[in-house]
Each structure stands twice: as C-alpha cells, then as structure tokens.
Image: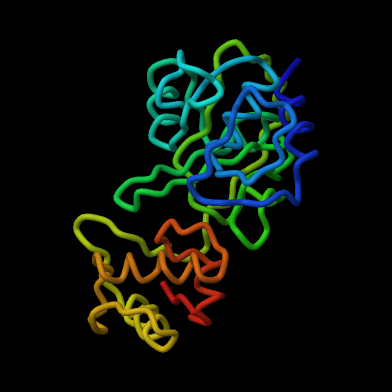
Amino acid sequence: MTGDDIVLLGDKHVGEPYALGAKVPKDDPNYKGPWDCTEFVSWLYYQTFGILYGCDDDHGDPHTAETYSGSWARDAKALGQIITVEQAKATPGAAILRFAGSGEVGHIAISDGNGGTVEAHGKTDGITNSVVDGRRWDMGILVPGVIYHANPVIPYRPPSITIYRLTHPYMVSPDVGRIQAALTRKGFDTDGIDNIFGEFTFHAVKLFQDSVGINPDGEVSALTAAELDVKITG
C-alpha cells in the first residue's frame, strides 16, 4: 500500500456530501458522508494504513477521534515530514494544508501527484477533484509509515491575486472596500465600508461563503471573489 492507494480510495467517494464540522468514524469502511475536509483526509489514512493522524488524540478511539487542521499542523511538525507545496503537488497521497490561523477554519486536500487533488471542498460540490495551483497553501505533509512515490516536481503556481483574510495587523486596501460593498449589497453586515479587513468583514465573508456552499474559511480567494462578483486588482 502506498500514497497512490489513498488517492484511489478518495476518488471512490467523489460526489459525496460535505458538512463543516462533520464527525467521521475513522474505523467505518462503509461511511459515505457527510464529510469535513480534515475528517476525510484522516479517514483515508486510517482506512489505507490503520494510522490515526491529525486527530485531537492520535492514540484514541478511531470511531470518535476528532480532527482539526491545527492537529494536522501539530503532527506534521512533531511526527511527520514537512515538504514544500511544490513537492506535495508531485507526490500522490501527500497532504496539502492551509493553516486555520485567525480564521479558525483551515483546509486540507490530498494530492494526486499530477497537480490535482481529491478533497472535501464545500457544500456545493462535496468530495471533489480540484487543483493545487492558484490557491493559498502553507505546507505539504508526508505521514510517517507511508510509502510515497513522487513524480517529477511540477512548478507550483501560487494565487495570481491577493487573498484577503483576517491578519494582524489587518489588511487594508480599496479591494477590501469593494468586498465590503458587495457583501453589504447581498445582506451581510461588515459594519461599514472602510477598506479594512477586520473582524466584522471576516465574519460576513464566512456567512456569505456558507450561504453559497463554499468552505467558510473567511478568506476571499478567486472563488469567493467570483461569487461576490468582485474584481480583485491587487
């Protein structure tokens, strides 16, 4: 069994439903959803290799162990091997992680080794195949005890636009004002239009994303900007 087997198993679940915060029994091979992104990846690893990873307690009961993007980051730093996003992009079965940070909701996907992913993405598309490029990621992860066969490295193309999100200090830009205006038009309160991506704007983005079925991470990527009908110039 290798990282390729994780991808094959993940692909069998494409089309199944997503629910943020869903709790998945890692020891149930017949589970069909709903899935949360970290629960899906941890389930794939447990089903393929019998390894609990990225859980609040990696030595706990696989039926009830809960996952979180912060736990995946913790395990990567303490137990696993951190690789670049570019390396993960070329490695079937590698995990690719975006930290939760201030936004409280991160994201994780499995690389297919050819620039694509299998992941629990959002309410609209559920388990889906997507791409690595053009998205914000923080690290690639290899899990100890798993055999990976990497393909030749494929250059990673980062996002072509600024991804506005909650940071400290806050991000400030006319683009943020356009985001705030669009949110306001759609009925999501940002506490005014001041070009500052603060707490109110962050929460408004999350509520909007949830309303349209996007992973509610509070970050305005190209996907969220397109749903808002906002052109990001930065």
Write down the quadrant of residue 37 in the picture: top right
In the image, residue 233 sits, relative to residue 219, either above or below, namely: below
x 54%, y 54%: residue: 135
Residue 214 rendering spot, x and y as whole percentages: 55, 62
Give the side of residue 33 with respect to residue 158, left or right: right
Give the side of residue 179 with respect to residue 38, left or right: left
Residue 19 rendering spot, x and y as whole percentages: 56, 51
In the image, residue 42 sits, relative to residue 129, either above or below, namely: above
Write down the quadrant of residue 188 in the picture: bottom left
Instruction: Give the number of callouts.
Output: 0
x 59%, y 41%: residue: 109
Q: Quadrant of the C terminus?
A: bottom left
Residue 217 rendering spot, x and y as whole percentages: 43, 56
Residue 42 rendering spot, x and y as whole percentages: 57, 29
Write down the quadrant of residue 93 in the picture: top right
Residue 192 vs residue 174, the one in the foreground: 192
* Colouring scheme, one of rainbow, by chain, secondary structure, one colour: rainbow
Give the side of residue 23 with respect to residue 187, left or right: right
